[in-house]
């Protein structure tokens, strides 16, 4: 496929980020839903698309994402066009219905992904599995791969625009125009958790929820006590994925733009931290989950999605199980 060439008409880090989220068309993806019951009595909602045989690609969305997120639809469309199956795992409470327990989800919670992979493997032991994670979902994916090492029962993975160091990401999102993303995401989180107040004994009040203005405040007052961390710093230290990358043994592609407005450049891993199984691609430009190569508005080239399926399709187990010729994801 052609090399990544940033769209000339989207300079800087913010325009590609916003154009990818709001400016590009979102493909229709025929899908079916499944509710997966979890061992602790809670649930996650899955969305399935594409083939029931051949490779299956699990998709992990970013913070407050869902099947409605354009990047989710685009990658599932690309996977289906390849002749594969796709399965989106909504993190707890992200499918449009609050989860049952007081707890929610967070950037270091790998247990639900591990349970899902176990279920999928038990259902179809011979079916090759890949995983794609975006932003927060990419952090969960890389942490899980590092935790599992050789025992991860997947054949390939791709992580896009990952907040490798959560403390650095929280600081970056409180600077300049990146505060716009922080405000948008915090508003969504307040709305989601606000629905639980009155239904659960939560370790924070509606006033606490309303007063938080930064991610550090939110994680210190909300995320940490809700999920058993001593505070935001303890959460960031234990949940950040960068420290787990050297332990990854599954073929993995990491795509991250150096100008990502969600993370300072110094927090991006370098090649020396990556084991032989990990390919790290860090172009100078691209924004956050952007990587737009469209020559003009309206002339869409799905470079990011094609790069993802190209990498996954190049892994031997997935390539051997692919029986439908690859087609364009555009």
Image (cartoon, rainbow, N blue to C red):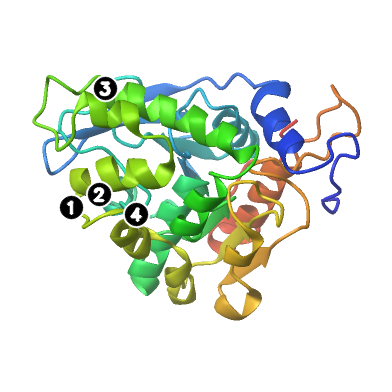
Classify mark 4: helix, strand or loop.
loop
Q: Secondary structure at mark 3?
A: helix
Q: Nearer the viewer, residue 293 or 167?
A: 167
Determine the CA span between mark 1 and mark 2: 6 Å
Any mark on residue 194, and which? 3
x and y percentages locating residue 29 in the rendered image: 56, 22
Residue at 30% x, 51% y is 109
Going from N to C along the chain, the mark reached first, 4 or 2, is: 4
From the image, state whether disc 4 or disc 2 is nearer to you: 2
On the rendered structure, is 256 left or right of 220?
right
User: In front: mark 4 or mark 3?
Assistant: 3
Q: Position of residue 76 (x, y in %)?
A: 56, 34
Q: What residue is disc 1 on?
A: 228
Q: CA distance from mark 4 to mark 1?
A: 12 Å
Residue 218, percent from left and from top: 34, 40
| Separation (CA) of disc 4 from disc 2 | 11 Å
Does the rendering let one see residue 200? yes
Separation (CA) of disc 3 from disc 1: 20 Å
Write the residue at 61% across / 81% down.
Answer: 272
Query: Pointer 4: residues within 10 angstroms few (<14), some, or many (20+)?
Result: many
Q: Residue at x 68, y 30 (%)?
A: 18
Q: Residue 162's mark?
A: none
Mark 2 Cα within 10 Å, few/some/many (few <14, many 20+)?
many
The residue at which mark 2 appears reads as 224
């Amino acid at each position: 496929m052609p090399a990544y060439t940033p769209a000339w008409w989207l300079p800087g880090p913010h325009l590609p980020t916003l154009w990818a989220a709001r400016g590009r068309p979102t493909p229709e993806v025929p899908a079916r839903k499944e509710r997966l019951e979890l061992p602790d009595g809670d649930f996650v909602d899955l969305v399935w698309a594409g083939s029931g045989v051949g490779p299956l690609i699990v998709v992990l969305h970013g913070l407050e994402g869902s099947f409605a997120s354009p990047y989710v639809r685009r990658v599932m469309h690309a996977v289906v066009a390849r002749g594969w199956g796709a399965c989106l795992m909504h993190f707890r409470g992200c499918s449009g219905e609050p989860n049952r327990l007081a707890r929610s989800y967070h950037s270091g919670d790998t247990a639900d992904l591990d349970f899902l992979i176990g279920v999928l493997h038990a259902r179809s032991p011979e079916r090759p599995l890949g995983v794609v994670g975006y932003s927060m979902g990419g952090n969960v994916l890389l942490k899980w791969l590092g935790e599992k090492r050789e025992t991860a029962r997947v054949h390939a993975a791709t992580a896009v625009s990952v907040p490798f160091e959560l403390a650095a990401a929280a600081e970056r999102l409180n600077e300049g125009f990146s505060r716009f993303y922080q405000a948008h995401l915090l508003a969504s989180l307040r709305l989601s958790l606000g629905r639980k107040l009155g239904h659960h004994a939560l370790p924070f009040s509606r006033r606490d929820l309303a007063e938080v203005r930064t991610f550090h405040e939110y994680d210190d007052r909300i995320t940490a006590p809700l999920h058993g961390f001593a505070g935001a710093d303890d959460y960031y230290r234990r949940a950040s994925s960068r420290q787990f990358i050297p332990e990854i043994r599954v073929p993995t592609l990491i795509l991250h733009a150096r100008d990502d407005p969600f993370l300072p450049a110094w927090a991006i891993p370098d090649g020396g931290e990556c084991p032989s199984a990990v390919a790290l691609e860090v172009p100078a430009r691209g924004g956050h989950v952007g990587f737009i190569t469209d020559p003009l508005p309206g002339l869409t080239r799905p470079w990011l999605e094609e790069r993802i399926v190209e990498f996954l399709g190049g892994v031997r187990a997935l390539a051997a199980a692919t029986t439908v010729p690859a087609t364009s994801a555009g």
